[in-house]
Amino acid sequence: MVIRSAIPEDLDRIYQITISSFGPYCRVGLREDLYGVVDGIGWEQRKGTSVRDFCEHNLNNVLVAEDDGHVVGYYTYGLDPDHGIGQLKVNAVHPTYQGRGIGTRLAQATLKRIKLSNRIKILLVSTIVRDRPARRVYEKLGFKELARTVDYTALKSELEPGPMNSDPGLNIRACLLYTSPSPRDATLSRMPASA
């Protein structure tokens, strides 16, 4: 198993791995389970194209795992040195190779690369709650859960009439996020209203 920087020739395989791996862990796929395909573009194409576009424009921020000359997994990351933040982004291992520690090795190699930047002080990663394999990897690496979010979705026709959806031509896509309680919430609740 070799972990190396991605090259342009890896993009098609990254796209294929994305489609084969993200089914149960893709927000767009979950939305399709409720409402069906939107605009004739399925989750596979949306997610695959999104990942491929990121990789094309940020190839220096993509690592791949190669086994016997074949790319079997990938990891992407982003750096915001002005704010001291490094972020683990989209990653996947082909289902045939899952459960062998490849995702963990990719994450470790990605973290090692991010740590090369002296300006990065905080590392972030996020995933959906149901993605237990990813959560196990992040916790094993030392990440601590910060907050949980809840994604809400609705068909425009299901929303209550009001100024936001009174225009029949208006296409609304919104997501409300709520976090679970954290120690910071107790501090905020004790602050005076004028603070």
Image (spheres, rainbow, N blue to C red):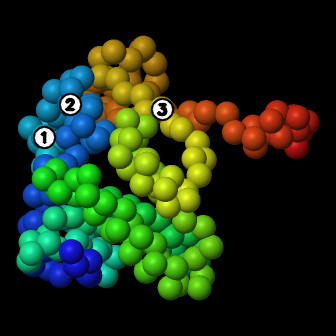
Residue 162 or 79: which is nearer the viewer? 79
Residue at 59% from the left image edge and 85% from the top image edge: 118
Q: Which mark is residue 42?
A: 1
Give the x, y percent position of residue 49. 17, 57
Which numbered disc flags the more N-terminal residue, 3 or 1?
Answer: 1
**Relative to 159, 148 lies left or right:** right
Q: Amino acid at mark 3?
A: Val
Packing grade of label 2 (10 A; few <14, some 14-19, many >=20) is some
Which residue is denoted by mark 3 in the rendering?
150
* Residue 87 is at least partly visible in this image: yes
Give the x, y percent position of residue 17. 15, 57
Give the x, y percent position of residue 162. 46, 19
Give the x, y percent position of residue 13. 10, 66
Q: Amino acid at mark 1?
A: Gly
Which numbered disc flags the more N-terminal residue, 3 or 2?
Answer: 2
Residue at 14% from the left image edge and 72% from the top image edge: 67
> For the C terminus, which image quadrant?
top right
Which numbered disc flags the more N-terminal residue, 2 or 1?
Answer: 2
Assign a secondary structure to mark 2: helix
Assign a secondary structure to mark 3: loop
Q: Which mark is residue 32?
A: 2
